[in-house]
Image: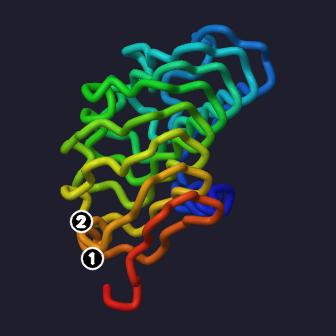
Amino acid sequence: MLVALLIASLAAVANAIFVDKSNRNLTSFPLDVRTDVTILVLSNNDLTSIVVPPQYSAVERLVARNNKLEAFPDARVAASNMVIVNVMSNKISYINPIFLDALIHLELLNLGINRLACFPPVSGISQSIQHIFLYGNVMTELPDMSAYANLKQLRLEGVPLKEISMEFMKQFPSLTTVGLGASEQRTLPNFCHL
């Protein structure tokens, strides 16, 4: 699903400048990348943190899957452009709310398969965010997402949630997909009444 979204978004951006620095054993942000890059892939490296330098403000899509990230990337320099952040399969246990809140145009956020016990209350992404993937994390309670009225997809597979309430689900009038899969919720709402 994510690959299809990425391909579709690539096709939609006719003037995209794509740079793939995957599988390079990188331990820091690669400064040999064109500064006008719009799609930057840093997957399968040894990155433990990412701070996007000031000269890379054009980045719209940051993909840093399968690294060793312990915290959410600081991409505030690209806040006015960033629409996708995919940091699946890392070791992220903390999201600085300031870093996430700055990404006011973010549409897709993939935090799947990390070590998140909570999701910070942020309002900056509330109008733009449409897809949030939290599958494979260690949260036992759902975050407050009441401001995310445009959310279309929420993936929670493998998250050991205690419950998903009807009140929680009613917050998302645009929601079309809820991924629960092997989640361990003890209580589920009757989705027929949404």
Tell me: 32 left or right of 126.
right
Provide residue 46's location: percent of width, then percent of height.
71, 15
Task: Say above or below: 59 vs 91.
Answer: below
At a point 39% along the width and 53% down the height, the residue shown is 107
Q: Residues within 10 Å of mark 1 (few under 14, many from 20)?
A: few
Q: Secondary structure at mark 1?
A: loop
Depth check: give the residue in front, 189 or 59: 189
- Farthest residue to the bottom: give it: 192
Which of the image's four quarters has the C terminus?
A: bottom left
Real-space Cα separation, disc 1 to disc 2, in angstroms: 6 Å
158 or 102, nearer to the observer = 158
Q: Residue furthest front?
A: 186
Q: Residue at x 27, y 54 (%)?
A: 145
Amino acid under label 1? Pro
161 above or below 150?
above
At label 2, the amino acid type is: Ala
First in sequence: mark 1 or mark 2? 2
Q: Is residue 124 above or below residue 154?
A: above
Q: Position of residue 6 (x, y in %)?
A: 61, 55
Residue 173's label in the rendered image is 1
The image quadrant that residue 189 belongs to is bottom left
Q: Position of residue 101 (x, y in %)?
A: 25, 35
**Quadrant occupied by the N terminus:** bottom right
- Look at the numbered discs 1 and 2 and tell me whether their residues touch, using CB distance below 8 Å: yes
Name the residue located 23 percent from the left edge and 52 percent from the top edge. 126
Residue shown at the point (63%, 12%) measured from the top left: 32
Q: Position of residue 27 (x, y in %)?
A: 66, 8
The residue tagged with tag 2: helix, strand or loop?
Answer: loop
How many discs appear? Answer: 2
Residue under label 2: 149
